[in-house]
Amino acid sequence: MLSKLKHLFSKASASTPEVDDDLLAFENPNFITDPDKIARLLGEIESSSPLCTIQIEGFAEDFSSSVLSIKLDKNAIILDELMPQHGNDLLLRSRALKLSTFHKGIHLSFHLANIEVGHSKGINYYKAPLPDRVFYPQRRRSPRLEISAIDIPFSGVVQRTGISIGGYLFDLSRGGAGVSVPVNRARVQRGDVIKNCQLTFDDYVMDFEFAVRFVKPVSATSPKVQIGGIFEGLSARSQSKLSYFITSLERVEIRKQKA
C-alpha cells in the first residue's frame, strides 16, 4: 500500500491550509470573510463545476444551477439558468438567492443579491456581486487527504433500508471519510447510519459504523454519488492503525512540498 503513496498527491488539492478539514466540520460553523480567500474558493468551485442548490426566499422548492464564471476584475459571479425552468421566473421577481453546494466534501453556502439577468444564445444567465462572506465550516485538527490514487474499498449495510452499499474512498481523515459510490441503490441520505462497515489498509481490516453527513451527485448526468460521514465505534486499535496510516500519507505530502 505504502508503495503507492508516491503517486498519491499528484492530484491532491485538499492539503492547502485554507481548506484543511474533516467531515466533522458540519458541527463547527465558520464563515470566510477575507476577499482573497473567497475569490480563491469560488474559483475552485468554478473549476470543479459542482451542481449547486438554489433557494429563493419565500419559496419552499429547491432549484439547481452551476457557477459559470468568476469575474474578479468585475467583482462578479455568473450563474447558469435555474432548473426546473419555473425557478427562473421566481428569481426574476426576487433578484436574490441562497446558493449551497459541496466542495471537497465540505458544505458551503452564501447569499447573492442585486442579481441581474443576461442572455446568451437564447439561454438566461445571472450576474451578481461576489458575496462578502461564505459559510464554510472548518476544523484543522484532522486534515482531509484526497486518496483517489489508492484503491481503498468501502462496504456496509444501510440501517434504514437494509441494503448493502459498496464503493471506494476519495478522501480520508482521522474522523471520517468520503466514499464514491457507482449508484445510490441503497437510497442513502443525510442522517443515515451505515452498519457493519469495513476498510482495509496496510493489511488491517477496520470495522466501524458510518454516520452519513452528506450525499451529493458527482454531476447532473452521472449516477455516481459521493457520500461523506464520520466514523463511529472505532476500537482503540483501529484508531491507532488509522492514525499511523494517515501519518504516513502526511509524510509523503511533506516530502513532496520540500522537493
Image: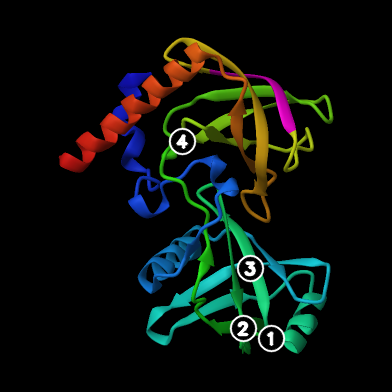
Q: Is residue 58 left or right of residue 70?
A: right
Q: Earlier in the sequence, mark 4 or mark 2?
A: 2
Three-letter code, disc 4? Ser
Looking at the rendered structure, the secondary structure element under dot 2 is: loop
Q: Residue flagged by tag 2: what amino acid is it?
A: Ala
- Residue 163 lies, with reference to residue 196, above or below; the image says below
Q: Is 163 placed above or below 93 here?
A: above
Q: Earlier in the sequence, mark 3 or mark 2?
A: 3
* CA separation in Å, label 4 and label 3: 27 Å
Question: What are the residue bounds of the magenta stretch?
Answer: 193-199
Residue type of the residue flagged with mark 1: Arg
User: Which sits earlier in the primary sequence, circle 1 or circle 4?
Assistant: 1
Q: Earlier in the sequence, mark 2 or mark 1?
A: 1
Q: Dot 2, crowdedness within 10 Å: few (<14), some or many (≥20)?
A: some
Residue annotated with mark 1: 95
Q: Secondary structure at mark 1?
A: loop
Instruction: Name the residue located 66 percent from the left edge and 83 percent from the top edge.
Output: 124
Residue picked out by circle 3:
99
Mark 4 — residue?
148
Q: CA distance from mark 2 to mark 1?
A: 6 Å
Count of labels shown? 4
Q: Are marks 2 and 1 in contact (CB under 8 Å)?
A: yes
Name the residue located 65 percent from the left edge and 28 percent from the top edge: 210
Tell me: residue 203, above or below residue 17. above
Q: Which residue: 68% across, 45% down?
A: 215
Q: Is residue 113 magenta?
A: no
Quadrant showing the N terminus: top left
Question: Which of the two marks, 4 or 3, is nearer to us in this view?
Answer: 3
Q: Label for residue 113?
A: 2
